[in-house]
Image (cartoon, rainbow, N blue to C red):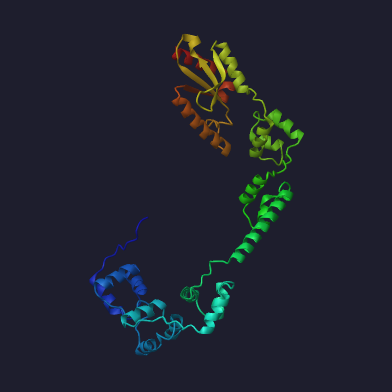
Amino acid sequence: MTRSCDISHWTDRKIRFLKDNVDFMTITKMAEILNFSRRSVAQKMRKLKILKDSFDGGFWTESELEILKNNYQSKDYEKLQKLLNRGRYEIIGKLRELCLLKVHRTRPWDCSEDNFLKEHYYDMPMETLCKRLNRGSGEINRRLNTLNLKRNIRSKESMKKFYETIHKRNEELESFIKENYSSMETELIAKKFNKTKGSIEHIASRLGVKKLPKKSLYSKQDDEIIHKYYGKVSPEELCKMLPGKNYVSIQNHVKTLNLPKKNSLIEIHMQFLLKINNIPYIYQFKVPDTNYTVDFLINTQQINGSKEKIIIETYGDYWHGNLTYRNKLNKIQKRQMKADIKGNEIIGKKGYKLFIIWEYDIMHRPHFVNEYLKALIKRFS
C-alpha cells in the first residue's frame, strides 16, 4: 500500500495564515485551504507550539466553564453534551486541562435490595435484575461477590432436571430420525430440532439408519443414447440429444453405467498407419508408478534393439482444444488442457519421449502422418 503524503511544502505565508486563523477556523477547514492533510496541519501546530482551545468546537466561554465546573460531578457525559452542545472528547479534554476528575459514585445498597438479590439471583436473568434494581450488570456482579453468591453453580436438583430434559430431547430426536430419516431431508430435520446437518447425519450413522436410493433421472432411452454417442459426439450435441441434462450430470451417470471403453476413430486410423509401417506398439499402455494410460508405446527393442521409450498420443481437436483451428476454448477444453500439461510433465520425468498427433492430421493428412512416423523411427534407430 502506498502511503499518502503532501507534495506541497510549508512556506512563511502558509505559517502566517495558520497563526492568524487558528482561533477562528477548524483544522479541517485550514487543511482544505492550505491543500494539506489534517494530520500534517496538526503536526505543524505542535512543532510551532500553537495551542488551539478546541480542535472542532472553538473557544470555551466563561459561562460554559462555569456550567462544566458546577455539573461535571452530578451529571453524566450525555447530559453534559446536551447542556454545552459539545462532543464527549472535548469535555474530557477540558476537564483534564482544568485538572478536574470526574468521580464515578455508586448508590449505596439497601437491605431491601440485598434481600431481593438473595431471593432472585439464581432464577432471574441479569436483564430483569438490572431493570428491577435500576443498576448496571457490573454493580450487581460486584455485589454478588461481596455477598458470596455465585450464579454459575447449580443445585443438585436443578442439575438432575437439566440432564433429564436433555435426555428426553435426545430420545425424541433419535426416535424421529429412525422414523423419518430415510424419507425426509436432513436439512428439514436439522431446522426442526435446531441442529446442524452434520450432527444429524452422525446420529443417523450411529443408529444405522440410511437414506433410500434416489430414483435415477435417466430413462432407458437416455441410456441407449449415451451408449451410442458418448465419446463420439461433442458435449454440446449430446446435451441437445438429452434435453434438460447438464454435461456434468451426464458424466456422473456414465460412471454408474460402467461403459466399456471403445476405440475412437483416431486410434483405429493410427493403428492402421502403425501396422503399414511395421512399427511394433503396445496399445493402452499404463505408465508405471502413475495413474496415466497412454495411447501407444513404440517397442523400439524389436525394431533396432535400442532402449528408447517413445509414446504417441492422439489428441482430438475438440476435447484437447486444437488452437490452430479454434480461436476460443470453453471450460471443458481449458480444464483438459491443464490436465494434459500436468500429465505430459509427469510422463517426461519418467524418461519417456512424448509425441502428439492431432485428429485433423490423422483424418485429413494421413500421408503427412505416415512420413512423420518414418522420420521418427529413423531418428531413434
Residue at figure coordinates x 54%, y 80% from the top left: 115
> Which one is in front, 180 or 81?
180
Q: Is 213 placed above or below 78 here?
A: above
Q: Quadrant of residue 3?
A: bottom left
Q: In this view, does 122 lie to the left or right of 378?
A: right
Q: Is residue 38 left or right of residue 202?
A: left
Quarter of the picture containing the C terminus is: top left
Say above or below: 167 vs 342: below
The x and y percentages for residue 267 are 60, 21
| Residue 49 appearing in the image | yes
Residue nearest the viewer, comparing 306 with 209: 209
Q: Picture coordinates of residue 102 (x, y %)?
A: 38, 81
The residue furthest front is 156
Residue 284 lies in quadrant: top right
Image location (x, y in percent) of residue 342: 49, 32
Query: In the image, is residue 351 above or below residue 1?
Result: above
Q: Which of 265 and 125 is in front in this view?
A: 125
Q: Is residue 294 above or below residue 47?
A: above
What residue sits 41% from the left and 80% below the top? 104
Q: Which quarter shows the N terminus?
A: bottom left
Quick one: 302 or 194, which is closer to the camera?
Answer: 194
